[in-house]
Structures are given as C-alpha cells and as structure tokens.
Amino acid sequence: MSSTFEKVADIIAETADIDRATITADSHAIDDLGIDSLAFLDIAFAIDKAFGIKLPLEKWTQEVNEGKAPAENYFVMKNLCARIDELVAAKSA
Amino acid sequence: MKLEYFQMIDKVVSFDRDPARLVAQSTIPLESPIFEGHFPGHPLMPGVLLIETMAQTSGYLLLGLNNFTAMPFLTKVVSANLRKFIGPDTPIDMEATLLHDGSGYAVTKARITQAGKAVCDAEIMFKTLPFPDGLGDKMRDNAARLGMSVEKGA
C-alpha cells in the first residue's frame, strides 16, 4: 500500500471514528464506510492540512452531480489517494 | 445587538483580505427577555450566544472574502472556550481570522474581548453553499448596515 493510502486511512479512521482495519483500497468512502457529507468536510480539512493541498470538493461534486464523472473516481480510497498524489505533484511542479 | 433577532453585530470596524481578518463591535443589551431566564436575578450573556456572535463575525469575514457569492453555514464548532462572564450593557470587541480556505468549506478562528480581556475564543467550520433565493441581497444589505464595504459578487 502507498504511504498516501496509509496516511489517508489513518485520517479517516481517526476523524470519522471508523475501525482502521475495515478501510481498504477498494473501500468507497460513502457507500462502504458510511461517511456523510459533513464528516467528509472534517476529513477534507485534515487531508488539506496533512498534504498541504486543497481538495477540489466543489468541482468533484459538480462533476458527479452532472454525470460527468462517477463518484467512484473520487470517493473510492485508491482513486482518492491517486487524486491526492496528483495534487501534491502539481503543487511541487 | 438584538438578541431576540439574532443580530449579534452592531458594527464592522475593519475587513482585510491579506491577512484575512474582520474586526467588529457590539454591546450586550441592557434588557432582554433572555436575561429573565439566564439567570433570574443574575443576568448573564449565554455562552451559546457568544458562540453565535463569533460565528456571525466569522461569517461576515467569509462573505467579504468571497465577495458575497456564497453563504457560509455553520457546520461545526471545532472548539470553544468560554473564559469570562459577560453581563448586560457591556461593550465587546470581536475578531475573526481565516484558518483554512477549503473547497466548499472554510475554517476560522474567532475571539471576543471586553476591555482588552479575553471573553471567549473558538475554532469554527462553515460549509459554503450558493445563496438561497434572495438571501444574497439581504446579506449584502445587512453588511452595508453594519458599515462593511460590500462589493457586488461576480
């Protein structure tokens, strides 16, 4: 597992009070882990701080609501971590 | 300050973008039905209303930063410390600063002082959403009434 996954899983477990062992790379944050929109704000805040980035939640939500992207692109753990890696790389480029 | 109408700010003293900071003033009213219950014969400003005052100060900070294009809604009081009792007919000073500007949310730090002494402080999270119909104009009117320079949103 990537260090990003480990870091994000730790954040989710601590912030949303979820058993760390239940969080896998294929976990869907909403459907599998039961994270609601308000709890996700806490998680986004913690991720923003930990990685020094700004998760584009508004853009992602708009894309999902308009059918331009499936929610899985952003809210399945392995995909979320890939998006975070992209944002970190873009920041340091 | 009109407690029954949730008008917690009398005046916006200053608003700055960089660093993001809003300073405001208010005076706890001499009389209010709230003081009849909180507490009988010993009127004190309720802590929840002090938190509301800090939230409103933060809210106007965020409105100013986004040029009144989106409404900040209180979602979480991350932490709050109530340090000093405040009674009726007391002037107070409020300050809010931006701790984090997220996408669709923001986190502020706010505090209230009275004659330079700490009354309370808090870290507060807001979700920012498009204005419900008509609310944007009303919030701009409110801000102008408080003396805040209001730019028309894009």
Image: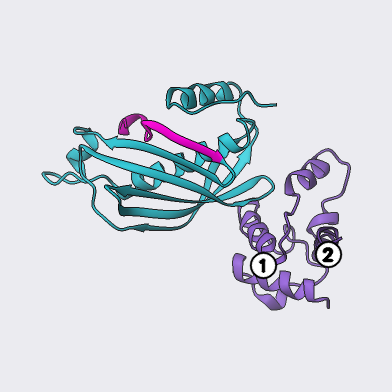
Chain colours: A purple, B cyan
Chain where mark 1 sits: A
Point out residue A80 in the picture as x, y percentages from the top left corner.
Answer: 80, 61
The residue beneath circle 2 is A85
**Which range is magenta?**
B1-16
Q: Which residue is mark 1?
A: A12
Callout 2: 10 Å neighbours few (<14), some, many (20+)? some
In the image, is residue B32 above or below residue A27? Answer: above
- The span from disc 1 to disc 2 (Cα, nearest Å) is 17 Å
How crowded is the residue under tag 1: few (<14 C-alpha within 10 Å), some, or many (20+)? many
Q: Please identify the quadrant where the C terminus of chain A is shown.
A: bottom right
Helix, strand or loop under label 1: helix
Q: Find residue A48 and report its image quarter.
A: bottom right
Given the image, on which type of amino acid does mark 1 rest? Ile
Q: Residue B35: where, in percent of width, then height?
A: 20, 39
In this orientation, which residue lies closer to the viewer: B46 or B154?
B154
Query: Is B11 colored magenta in this rendering?
Result: yes
Q: Image point 42% across, 34% down: which residue?
A: B13
- Which of the pair B29/A35 is nearer the observer? B29
> Between B44 and B95, which is closer to the camera in this rendering?
B95
